[in-house]
Image (cartoon, grey):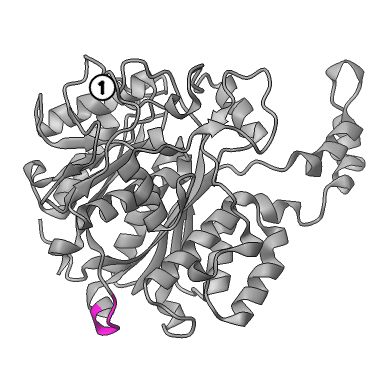
């Protein structure tokens, strides 16, 4: 398949995760095999299956570290003024974008703003309970009934006027566009765990088609919230692990039993290769291909055979113009649910061969599932790894599921000389998105 003449490279990365802020802090945790899942400290968790998650420690947007912040005083003033309109998901995304912008060596006013766009993965943002509680209480009656007439007439007036602006999923991209003066294409994809990869893939194609030269892309999400915990519990997704909190999320392990919620942001600056070279940017890697797919099962839910994942990966490989045997490792979704991990493994076995030797890693054991942000964070981690000649290992995969015949990277970081990897994610309904990335060792 003919490749586009406009090649797309990665020139900036931003990471805000439970493991820390910035690439260095995150990679140090992977080297040490140190996970960040622990008992939730942000709010009390009672009468739910579990009380653990991956919280970003000590994140305060008002005291955002200077080394990751743009030095422009007007930008800082505008950012501080905007914080009251930002839910935590938005704050994480903006922090990651600012970090990636700096990492790419960009400065405000340096680029033609009409050729810079934003494409982000975002999720359902949970409201702060005290912002809606007065209105809900006013319309609530004895016996658990809800009076919709009271709600429409009186209760809505109790809700702060700016409430909606804090919780719309597209506000992540909106704030980044305003603060970094991105006047080109702007989009938000809300497709759960597939959202980040879908957004990166769409941004890659926008540049490939010549509609922009630079795109800020990736995703962010926070499931460290009482409402998120309740939703996971009602959906039957949450892990019931009662042992050491850091061992709760167990991708591909025989004892895996469900999701552990997390939060964070992974943001990339991608740009057309010649544009990057012309401005003297450091190229970290190149996006070679993108693909998406869906199980499309008649009754909904996840196909246990992983058909959607297989479709997405084969599409990404075709787009990249490479064979499966050229992949150096796979960064899998690894949600740590029984059905999802097995479905992924079956898709990998059909693509790479039964008993395949392609190394497979998965990173949610370190930080939980940050849903719309997970794909970008995991992609960035593999990119850092291959540029160091290393593959991060799976945490808590102590007893691999005997039904899974993959070369799982366990126990310690594995050396690699192959900078090409596959990053793939899927939702509980079978939507899947995959990207083929090549590290800087071969990007030029």
**Residue drawn at point x = 29 percent, y = 41 percent:** 424
Q: Looking at the image, can residue 122 be seen?
A: no
Does 279 appear in magenta?
yes
Question: Which residue in the protein does label 1 denote?
Answer: 305
* Prevailing secondary structure of the magenta residues: loop
Residue depicted at 49% across the width and 34% down the height: 37
Read off the magenta span. Answer: 277-281
Relative to residue 123, is residue 306 drawn left or right?
A: left
Tell me residue 383's x, y (percent): 27, 54
188 lies above or below 262: below
Looking at the picture, does residue 426 appear above or below residue 74? above
Q: Is residue 173 visible?
A: yes
Q: Residue furthest front?
A: 32
With respect to residue 331, does 137 lie above or below?
above
Q: Give percent across and percent down for residue 75.
A: 60, 77
Observer-nearest of 244 and 203: 244
Taking depth in this image into account, of 220 and 187 the one nearest to the observer is: 220
Q: Residues within 10 Å of mark 1 (few under 14, many from 20)?
A: some
Quadrant of the image occupied by residue 129: top right
- Tell whether 316 sits left or right of 155: left
Q: 375 or 142: which is nearer to us?
A: 375
SS at badge 1: loop
Give the x, y percent position of residue 300. Answer: 42, 23
């Amino acid at each position: 398949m003919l490749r586009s003449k406009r090649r797309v490279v990665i020139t900036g990365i931003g990471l805000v995760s439970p493991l820390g802020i910035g690439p260095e802090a995150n990679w140090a945790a992977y080297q040490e095999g140190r996970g960040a899942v622990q008992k939730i400290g942000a709010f009390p968790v009672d009468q739910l299956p579990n009380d653990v998650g991956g919280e970003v420690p000590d994140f305060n947007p008002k005291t955002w570290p200077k080394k990751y912040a743009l030095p422009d005083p007007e930008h800082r003033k505008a950012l501080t003024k905007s914080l009251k309109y930002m839910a935590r998901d938005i704050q994480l995304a903006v922090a990651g974008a600012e970090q990636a912008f700096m990492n790419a060596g960009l400065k405000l006013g340096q680029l033609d703003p009409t050729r810079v766009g934003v494409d982000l993965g975002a999720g359902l943002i949970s409201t702060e309970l005290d912002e809606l509680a007065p209105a809900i209480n006013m319309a609530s009656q004895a016996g658990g009934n809800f009076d919709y007439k009271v709600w429409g007439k009186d209760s809505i007036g109790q809700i702060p006027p700016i409430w909606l602006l804090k919780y719309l999923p597209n506000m992540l991209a909106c704030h980044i566009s305003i603060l970094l003066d991105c006047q080109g294409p702007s989009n938000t994809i809300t497709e759960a765990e597939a959202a980040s990869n879908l957004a990166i893939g769409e941004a890659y194609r926008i540049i490939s088609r010549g509609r922009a030269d630079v795109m800020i892309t990736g995703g962010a999400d926070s499931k460290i919230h009482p409402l998120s915990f309740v939703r996971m519990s009602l959906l039957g997704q949450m892990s019931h692990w009662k042992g050491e909190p850091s061992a709760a999320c167990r991708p591909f392990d025989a004892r895996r039993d469900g999701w552990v919620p997390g939060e964070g942001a992974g943001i990339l600056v991608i740009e057309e290769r010649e544009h990057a070279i012309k401005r003297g940017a450091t190229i970290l890697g190149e996006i070679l291909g993108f693909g998406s797919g869906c199980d499309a099962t008649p009754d909904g839910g996840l196909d246990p055979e992983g058909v959607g994942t297989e479709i997405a990966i084969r599409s990404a490989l075709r787009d990249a113009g490479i064979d499966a045997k050229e992949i150096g490792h796979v960064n899998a979704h690894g949600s740590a649910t029984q059905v999802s991990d097995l479905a992924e493994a079956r898709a990998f076995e059909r693509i790479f061969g039964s008993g395949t030797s392609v190394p497979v890693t998965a990173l949610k054991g370190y930080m939980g599932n940050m849903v719309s942000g997970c794909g970008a964070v995991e992609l960035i981690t593999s990119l850092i790894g291959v540029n160091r000649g290393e593959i991060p290992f799976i945490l808590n995969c102590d007893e691999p599921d005997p039904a899974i015949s993959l070369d799982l990277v366990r126990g310690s970081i594995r050396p690699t000389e192959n900078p090409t990897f596959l990053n793939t994610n899927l939702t509980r309904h079978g939507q899947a998105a995959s990207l083929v990335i090549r590290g800087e060792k071969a990007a030029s």
